[in-house]
Image (spheres, helix red, strand yellow):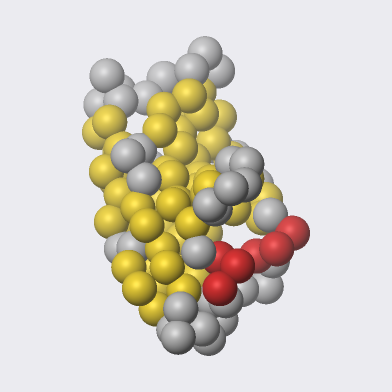
């Protein structure tokens, strides 16, 4: 069974930076992508960034140029978030998508506030 453990959330001032980490354990078969999604208060779940098994990267429009996704050792994915603004406040979820399933972490809170 795939398990995802996220870390790195917290409180940061506008303009600041945070780095989120996600470590996957278990056997991942037919991997499609690893990435990050977020849900802000009162809003729908939205894609932040994802990286495919072939290395293709997609970013949500609102984070392009500010966030960077990276992957290491096949089962670790990171999200470097720079120039954060209050609209980035949300619970961030790590997600692993396979050909047959979707696996989600428990979420980590990111709060951007002065």
Quarter where residue 88 is shown:
bottom right
At x 51%, y 29%, the residue is 97
Q: Does residue 92 lie above or below 28 as drawn?
A: below
Out of 106 and 3, give the one closest to the viewer. Answer: 106
> Does residue 76 appear in this view?
no
Q: In this view, does 108 lie to the left or right of 91?
A: left
At x 55%, y 18%, the residue is 99
Kindly give the residue lying farthest to the right in the view shown. 61
At x 41%, y 20%, the residue is 29
Q: In which quarter of the image is the C terminus?
A: bottom left
At x 70%, y 63%, the residue is 62
The percent position of residue 44, horizontal first and vertical second, equals 62, 41
> Does residue 110 appear in this view?
yes
Kindly give the residue lying farthest to the front in the view shown. 42
The percent position of residue 112, horizontal first and vertical second, equals 46, 74
Out of 96 and 38, give the one closest to the viewer. Answer: 38
The percent position of residue 86, horizontal first and vertical second, equals 56, 73
Q: Does residue 35 lie above or below 3 as drawn?
A: below
Q: How many labels does the image show?
A: 0
Q: Quadrant of the N terminus?
A: top left
The percent position of residue 102, horizontal first and vertical second, equals 48, 24
Q: Does residue 100 lie above or below 4 as drawn?
A: above
């Amino acid at each position: 069974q795939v398990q995802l453990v996220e870390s790195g959330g917290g409180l940061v001032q506008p303009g600041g930076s945070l780095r989120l980490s996600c470590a996957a354990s278990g056997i991942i078969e037919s991997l499609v992508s690893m990435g990050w999604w977020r849900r802000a208060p009162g809003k729908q779940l939205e894609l932040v960034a994802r990286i495919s098994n072939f290395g293709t990267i997609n970013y949500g429009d609102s984070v392009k140029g500010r966030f960077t996704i990276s992957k290491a050792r096949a089962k670790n994915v990171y999200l470097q978030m720079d120039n954060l603004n209050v609209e980035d406040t949300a619970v961030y979820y790590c997600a692993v998508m396979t050909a047959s399933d979707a696996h989600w972490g428990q979420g980590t809170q990111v709060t951007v506030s002065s």
